[in-house]
Amino acid sequence: MNVLVMGEDSSIKGRPLNTLSILLKKLDCKVYNIFDEDTSNFSFYFNILKKVNIVIFLDYDGPQEYRVRNYAIAKLLNKKIVRWWVGSDVLFCLEDKFMARNAYDLAKFSDFQLAVSHHLVKELESLHIKSQYVPSVLDPLNHNYSKEYDLSLNLSVLVYLPSSRKVFFKYDLIHEVIKTNPGFHFHIVADETHSLSSFSNVTSYGYVEDMSIVWNKCNILLRQTKHDGLPRMALTALQLNKHVIYSWELPGCILANTTETISSALQQIKQSSKKNYCSETALDKILSPCPHMFFKSHIINAKYNFSLSKYFWAILFVLKYTLILKFRKNY
């Protein structure tokens, strides 16, 4: 089976499409990947389309009009169309009515709309887009990850705080938590500005290629976001029986989103002096349906069912978005 994955560079470790591509290859698929900008080169896109059976994409821009048209063309070529919602893509549609309109149009001819968390399914319902829950694909853990739980690390906290998205990842809150909890050591990854390195209880790594180096030094993940899907860092923490303090409800995690509640959670973990015994049960609950089995049985191996209504919508949206693009070019 030949599959085209679109929306980001699937070769970059840690990105959602990278993990998905690894899974697809394990399912004996030949995987093609093109970037968002490549779809504006229609001949390039069309030549790849002729080689594949399935198009799977995530799209943080709505998608834009030319991409709705191009996905509709893929449907007219009888390709199975799968949209994968992972978090911020839903948030952007909630905040932008034009993105929401394009996403709604695209959903009319898609075969699957998959969302990685239950709350994303509900948010998409508010946009009149029907989706189904299929959890994130687990990142494979290599041999560098220590599977032994070291209780001496119960005062060490891992924080993901990317330089370009500090507001989204609640920089001010993280700053206060670090300041309020001098007895804990915070390991900050992805902040290439090292904005919190002045604190004596902070180690700032910047970009990290091999996350096992940092995971092996921490027993706690602190994740605070304005919005989220199903964070694979949280899944990794649960795989390693580590504690997770999270701003959203998730099985096996401690719900906390203020300085006071996070500080209380840290003290709770410190006093417990044990690993996260809920992690295995929580993972079983989160990972149902199993993403590996879902992609295998419902997408890869399932027979393509022609739908006249989806074909009709695809024709309509090819015409609609071609006219929109032509109008914009002329004016």
Image (spheres, rainbow, N blue to C red):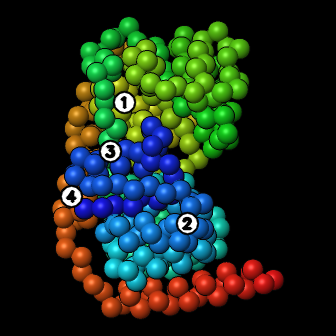
Question: Is 166 placed left or right of 120 in the picture?
Answer: right
Of the residues under marks 1 and 4, which one precedes in the sequence? Answer: 1
- Using a 10 Å C-alpha cutoff, classify the residue at mark 3 as few (fewer than 14 neighbours), some (14 to 19) or many (20 or more): some
Q: Nearer the viewer, residue 178 or 205?
A: 205
Asked whether residue 85 appears in the rendered view, the answer is no
State the residue position of label 1. 237
Kindly report which numbered mark, 1 or 3, lies closer to the viewer in this rendering. 3
User: Type of residue at label 2?
Assistant: Thr
Judged from the image, the secondary structure of the residue bearing numbered disc 1 is helix
Q: Position of residue 64 (x, y in %)?
A: 61, 70
Indicate the amino acid at tag 4: Lys
Q: Secondary structure at mark 3?
A: helix
Q: Left or right: 205 with respect to 11?
A: right
Q: State which tag comes first along the sequence, 1 or 3.
A: 3
| Helix, strand or loop at mark 4 | helix
Give x and y (percent) for residue 75: 40, 79
Compared to residue 106, the image places residue 31 above or below, namely: above
